[in-house]
Amino acid sequence: MSDRVLVACGTKFGATAEIAEAIGTALRVAGLRVNVTRARKVRSLNPYRAVVLGSAGYMARWRRDAMRLLRHRRRELAQRDVWLFWSGSVGEDKGEQDAQQERWTKPKRAQQLASEIGAREHVVFGGRVSDYAGSFMRKKMARNIPPELRERRDWDTIEAWARKIAAALHEPPAAGG
């Protein structure tokens, strides 16, 4: 297995892809070899030592292509270092999460698969609501969201998380492993 890292995502309107690109850039700056792509384009995990997989969130569910990659490649993913992220119109609250908020920010099936593959972390980032993409009704609903709530991505937090991943990948393997 090489030292390459795959950053893949399921995205509908591009906001999650922008997060994946930012993660990829931070990992490259940290000296890692990185490929960033859409989850639906992943054909093999063989060249990768680690995988960062993300999805846009809709109605407490991951995008189908990201979930398919997570579900169908779980044996391969279990043999790699894996980090997961979810992006939606709401970010993870800094305070205590109640069960209802946890349900909306970390969907049960994604959490179950994350546990099965031994994912190192599953984080939630705020997303972006665009009033320029999607159906007429979606655009109309988006325009009713106050402008200050349409962009919830915290680029400093995203970059810090990517640096944390890079640091973990630069650590020597545990002895006796």
Image (cartoon, rainbow, N blue to C red):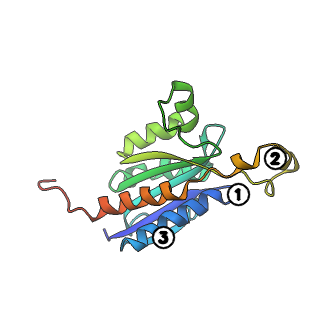
Residue drawn at the location 55% of the way across and 54% of the way down: 154
Kind of residue at disc 1: Phe
Nearest the eye: 79 or 16: 16
Find the residue positioned furthest to the left.
176
Camera-near label (2 vs 3) is 3
Residue drawn at the location 47% of the way across and 30% of the way down: 96
Kind of residue at disc 2: Arg
Quick one: quadrant of the N terminus?
Answer: bottom left
Secondary structure beneath dot 2 equals helix
The disc at residue 138 is: 2
The earlier-in-sequence mark between 2 and 3 is 3
Nearest the eye: 155 or 61: 155
Question: Is residue 155 shown above or below 113?
Answer: below
Residue bearing the label numbered 1: 13
Residue 37 % position (x, y): 55, 66
Residue drawn at the location 75% of the way across and 54% of the way down: 130
Find the residue positioned furthest to the front.
148
Residue bearing the label numbered 3: 25
Kind of residue at disc 3: Thr
Nearest the eye: 107 or 41: 107
Residue 13: tell me if it is visible. Answer: yes
Residue 119 % position (x, y): 38, 47
Alpha-carbon span between mark 1 and mark 2 = 12 Å
> Badge 3: how crowded within 10 Å, few (<14), some, or many (20+)?
some
Alpha-carbon span between mark 3 and mark 1 = 20 Å
